[in-house]
Image (cartoon, helix red, strand yellow):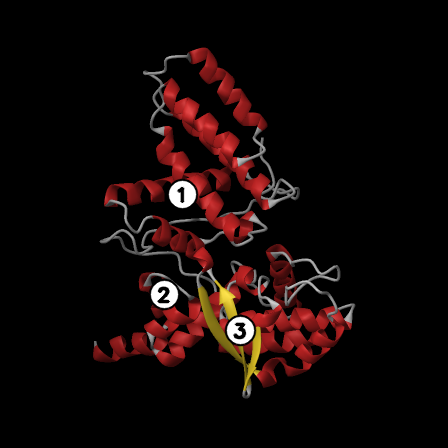
């Protein structure tokens, strides 16, 4: 039986749903020659179908599986448990938010001090997990979501080549999208100002959606003709970004006048609660489609790829891209050099 990619109410429960079924699939395919209690193993396989309420419950179950005799299950389970915690730490709202860049960031941060063999095991676990989901998910209309994760060159395995290039908007498409942000027919003008403000902030600074929805009131500061914004990235690492006042002045004034909540969040819903990543991604996709822009991944994270691509094309400064995006490893930023047409043209001229 197949299930929708976001088949549960929350990201945590959905991830646990897929993880339980994936490890069940691996248990049934791994060697069971050393199993000491076949009856209990059969019972565990059935329990995995019903799922778990917490990652701790599943972790306890995996420890029991190892003790029974399927010791290699930890090769698949441990990296995915860490990915679950990694994604939960910055407020993921949908399984669709996971892509090559996020997984590369995860691998770079989680495997930095591990051996090459262990790094390869992490990659194998991720490929197996998302490959499994690719085959097992299906929406009500019969369509399936495809990750197509490859991780051929995520910066942790020397000598590997090739990686799936992220979707981005070129300069003409960016201009079309910017006009669409202002022209999109929102129902409420105050909420419209907030939505325009957060989307422009993401586009013009390259911050992650999770970072944008977590900005506090005191993190948005005026500085001359610009605003300095303090954000907290993965691992709670702080950094600052900047946006020109003229880009957001009108929407910022409307939003600040409307926003009356005492909560610390700068961007919030009408009840003062935190916005979700899935809400922002759906909004970006709707605006893109309203002007006929279609990419492989139309979500808000694509705006970050757009920022990084155009930043490198105009600066040819990889360090600047790394610092602006908050990448721990410069190899994660290096993917954006593939979009440099001037360098490609130079190679053809030389040849």
**Residue 60: which numbered mark, if any?**
none
Q: Position of residue 294 (x, y in %)?
A: 57, 64
Q: Quadrant of the N terminus?
A: top right
* Tag nearer the camera, 3 or 2: 3
Task: Give the SS element for disc 1.
Answer: helix
Q: Earlier in the sequence, mark 3 or mark 2?
A: 3
Q: Which class describes the residues within 10 Å of circle 3: few (<14), some (14-19), or many (20+)?
A: many
C-alpha gap between disc 1 and disc 2: 21 Å
**Residue that numbered label 1 is attached to:** 126
311 left or right, relative to 117: right
| Residue designated by label 2 | 333
Q: Is residue 147 above or below residue 54?
A: below
Q: Please give the name of the residue rendered at 41% of the width and 26% of the height, measured from the top-left corner.
A: 63
Label located before the other in sequence (3 or 1): 1
Q: Which residue is mark 3?
A: 229
Quadrant where the C terminus sits is bottom left
Query: Outermost residue toward the bottom?
Result: 224
Residue contact between numbered discs 3 and 1, judged by CB atoms under 8 Å: no
The reply to whether discs 3 and 2 touch (Cβ–Cβ < 8 Å) is no
Q: In the picture shown, does residue 300 fall above or below 172?
A: above
Question: Position of 269 compared to 311: left or right?
Answer: right
Q: CA distance from mark 3 to mark 1?
A: 34 Å
- Point out residue 244 in the picture as x, y percentages from the top left corner: 55, 83
Residue at 42% across, 76% down: 311
The local secondary structure at tag 3 comes to: strand
């Amino acid at each position: 039986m197949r299930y929708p990619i976001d088949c549960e109410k929350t990201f945590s429960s959905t991830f646990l749903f897929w993880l339980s079924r994936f490890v069940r699939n691996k248990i049934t395919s791994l060697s069971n020659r050393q199993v000491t209690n076949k009856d209990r193993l059969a019972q565990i396989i059935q329990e995995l179908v019903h799922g778990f309420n917490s990652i701790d419950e599943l972790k306890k179950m995996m420890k029991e599986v190892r003790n029974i005799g399927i010791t290699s299950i930890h090769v698949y389970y441990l990296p995915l448990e860490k990915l679950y915690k990694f994604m939960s730490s910055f407020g993921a709202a949908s399984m669709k938010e996971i892509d090559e860049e996020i997984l590369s960031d995860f691998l770079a941060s989680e495997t930095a001090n591990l051996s090459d063999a262990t790094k390869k095991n992490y990659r194998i676990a991720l490929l197996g997990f998302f490959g499994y989901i690719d085959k097992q998910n299906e929406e009500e209309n019969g369509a399936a979501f495809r990750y197509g994760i490859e991780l051929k060159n995520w910066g942790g395995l020397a000598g590997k080549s090739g990686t799936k290039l992220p979707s981005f908007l070129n300069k003409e498409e960016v201009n079309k999208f910017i006009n669409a942000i202002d022209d999109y027919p929102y129902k409420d003008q105050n909420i419209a100002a907030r939505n325009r403000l957060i989307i422009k902030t993401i586009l013009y600074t390259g911050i992650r959606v999770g970072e944008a929805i977590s900005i506090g009131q005191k993190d948005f500061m005026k500085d001359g003709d610009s605003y300095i914004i303090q954000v907290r990235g993965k691992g709670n690492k702080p950094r600052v970004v900047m946006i020109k006042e003229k880009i957001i002045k009108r929407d910022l004034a409307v939003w600040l006048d409307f926003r009356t909540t005492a909560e610390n969040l700068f961007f919030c819903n009408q009840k003062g609660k935190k916005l979700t990543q899935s809400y922002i991604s759906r909004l970006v996709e709707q605006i893109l489609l309203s002007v006929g822009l279609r990419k492989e991944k139309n979500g808000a994270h694509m705006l970050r790829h757009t920022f990084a691509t155009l930043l490198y094309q105009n600066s040819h400064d990889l360090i600047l891209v790394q610092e602006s995006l908050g990448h721990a490893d410069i190899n994660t930023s290096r993917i954006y050099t593939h979009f440099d047409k001037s360098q490609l043209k130079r190679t053809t001229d030389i040849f």
